[in-house]
């Protein structure tokens, strides 16, 4: 059974930092493309950052230079370091695991990030 468990969300003030973690089980983690998506109230889910099994990363323009995605294959965990947070970063953040050469993917249940003064 595949499980993706996000953690690290919370309430922070603008300009502060948070680190999200997503621990995966039930998959061969090292071969999957891992991604972080977010969904703000009233908006569609959007890609925030993605890291391929090769280590190549992609970021949404809105987070470039502020967020960093990384992975630890030994721990089956992907991270999202979020710096200089803005109120518009407020959303539920979801972890995604996409199988290589396949349409199959898996989602976590999400963790809420609220940026407010």
Image (cartoon, rainbow, N blue to C red):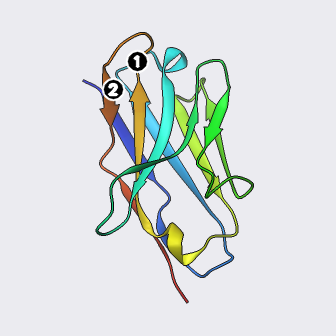
- Frontmost residue, 9 versus 74: 9
Q: Can you identify the residue that label 2 sits on? A: 105
* Of pointers 1 and 2, the one earlier in the residue sequence: 1
Q: In the image, is residue 117 above or below residue 54?
A: below
For this view, does 14 lie left or right of residue 46?
A: right
User: How dense is the environment of label 2, judged by Cα within 10 Å: few (below 14), some, or many (20 and up)?
Assistant: few
Q: In the image, is residue 75 above or below residue 41?
A: above
Residue 58 coordinates in the image, percent (x, y)? 62, 37
Circles 1 and 2: CB distance less than 8 Å?
yes
Q: In the image, is residue 32 above or below residue 60?
A: above
Residue 91 coordinates in the image, percent (x, y)? 41, 65
Q: What element does badge 1 sit on?
A: loop
Find residue 85 and report its image quarter: bottom right
Q: In the image, is residue 110 above or below residue 16?
A: above
Q: Can you identify the residue that label 1 sits on? A: 99
The residue that appears at 69% across and 77% down in the rendered structure is 15
Find residue 16 and report its image quarter: bottom right
Residue 17 coordinates in the image, percent (x, y)? 66, 67
User: How dense is the environment of label 1, judged by Cα within 10 Å: few (below 14), some, or many (20 and up)?
Assistant: some
Residue 81 coordinates in the image, percent (x, y)? 65, 53
Q: CA distance from mark 1 to mark 2?
A: 6 Å
For this view, does 44 lie left or right of residue 24?
A: left
The circle on residue 78 is none
Count of labels in the image = 2
Q: What element does badge 2 sit on?
A: strand
- Frontmost residue, 27 versus 105: 105
The residue that appears at 30% across and 20% down in the rendered structure is 104
For this view, does 73 lie left or right of residue 99?
A: right
The residue that appears at 61% across and 58% down in the rendered structure is 62
């Amino acid at each position: 059974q595949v499980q993706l468990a996000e953690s690290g969300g919370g309430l922070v003030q603008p300009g502060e930092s948070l680190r999200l973690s997503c621990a995966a089980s039930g998959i061969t983690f090292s071969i999957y493309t891992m991604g972080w998506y977010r969904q703000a109230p009233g908006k569609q889910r959007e890609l925030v950052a993605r890291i391929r099994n090769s280590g190549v990363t992609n970021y949404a323009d809105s987070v470039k230079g502020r967020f960093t995605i990384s992975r630890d294959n030994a721990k089956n965990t992907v991270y999202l370091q979020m710096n200089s947070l803005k109120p518009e970063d407020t959303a539920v953040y979801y972890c995604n695991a996409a199988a290589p050469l396949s349409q199959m993917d898996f989602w976590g249940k999400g963790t809420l990030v609220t940026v407010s003064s």
